[in-house]
Amino acid sequence: MTSNMKRIITGVIAIPLLIAIIVLLPQYNYLCFALLVLVVSIIGSYELHNILSKHVTGKLLFPPYLGSIQIIATYIQYAFYPFYNLTLYSLIGLIFIALAMEIKKGEVDNFKASIERISYTVLQIVYPNTFAIFFIKFCFLDNAWLYLLIFFALVFGSDTFAYFIGKLLGKNNKGIVKVSPNKSVAGFIAALVFPAIIGCLCGVFIKAFEVDGYLGFFLGLSTAAAAAIGDLVESVLKRSANMKDSGKIIPGRGGMLDSIDSLLFGAPVFIAFMHFMQYVA
């Protein structure tokens, strides 16, 4: 079975399942979706740990799963303690632990690689976990199911159109960025234009979206641009470690990070836009 066929089958199974979780299981502020985010982030954290371990001097002692505490803290904050910034406290607490661990770990090489290990550990805390907390923020929006579906439509649409338009029209205009030489100008334009159109149409035809067509266009454009950057950042990490994929858990796509990189970067932009709209409304 070809990689493209595996990719299609994975999408046919995963996307309806994701929609079902969002639409059919909204109980307790989409707790099932939040748990899915938690599991996906933990898997992604282990993949990043493996990538970083190929470069770091010595061994990264910070457990990959600890970064996901931020996701749990964010859900608890929004559900029970909205006046306490548990998200920020959890992030600072994790970085505090990482820094403190180096006091002992640094003795191994007389602290020559301490800055390197600290930098890698902080990256492991932040990516994907700090980015993933924005999915928890989705769960506490009014009409959260609608915003989640629109967001996924924008990012998946961007990825899909970029792939197929790139295959169709991008043979002679590849190499737009060195880190991902198979990316084409045609694919990049499609990745931006089609989500912008989707956002515009959602703004025009979906009243509950509370965004007009013009703003929907810019929401789709900015979310898609952020998603494209996320894809390229993941390519930077993999190239640095001389790896083709971050893992093998997703048939046809590679690792978990390979599948969520665009989502991780797109979510903060989408949420920031919606919060801005609520503020000015």
Image: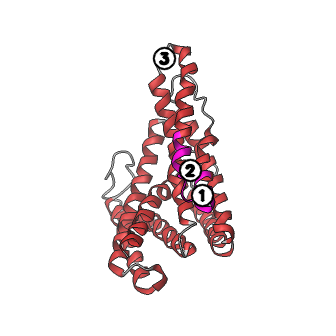
Q: Secondary structure at mark 2?
A: helix
Amino acid type for the residue under numbered disc 2: Leu
How much space separates mark 2 and mark 1, taking CA atoms? Answer: 8 Å
Q: Is residue 251 visible?
A: no
Q: Secondary structure at mark 3?
A: loop
**Relative image position of residue 183 (x, y in whole percent):** 38, 55
**Relative image position of residue 262 (x, y in whole percent):** 47, 57
Q: Earlier in the sequence, mark 3 or mark 2?
A: 2
For the stretch drawn in magenta, the main secondary structure is helix
Q: Which residue is mark 2?
A: 86
Amino acid type for the residue under numbered disc 3: Phe
Q: Is residue 24 left or right of residue 183?
A: right
How much space separates mark 1 and mark 3, taking CA atoms? Answer: 40 Å
Q: Are marks 2 and 1 in contact (CB under 8 Å)?
A: yes
Q: Which residue is mark 1?
A: 81
Q: Secondary structure at mark 1?
A: loop
Name the mark nearer the viewer: 3 or 2: 2
Please rate how many residues cluster around mark 1, counting C-alpha atoms within 10 Å: few if below 14, some from 14 to 19, many from 20.
Answer: few
Q: Is residue 67 visible?
A: yes
Amino acid type for the residue under numbered disc 1: Tyr
Q: Is residue 89 left or right of residue 172?
A: right
Q: How is the image coloured?
A: secondary structure
Above or below, 92 relative to 108: below
Q: Earlier in the sequence, mark 2 or mark 1?
A: 1
Please rate how many residues cluster around mark 2, counting C-alpha atoms within 10 Å: few if below 14, some from 14 to 19, many from 20.
Answer: many
Q: Nearer the viewer, residue 203 or 188?
A: 203
Q: Which residue is mark 3?
A: 111
Q: Which residues are magenta?
A: 73-92
Q: Nearer the viewer, residue 212 or 181?
A: 212
The residue at the point 63 percent across, 52 percent down is: 72
What numbered label is drawn on residue 251? Answer: none
The residue at the point 62 percent across, 72 percent down is: 19
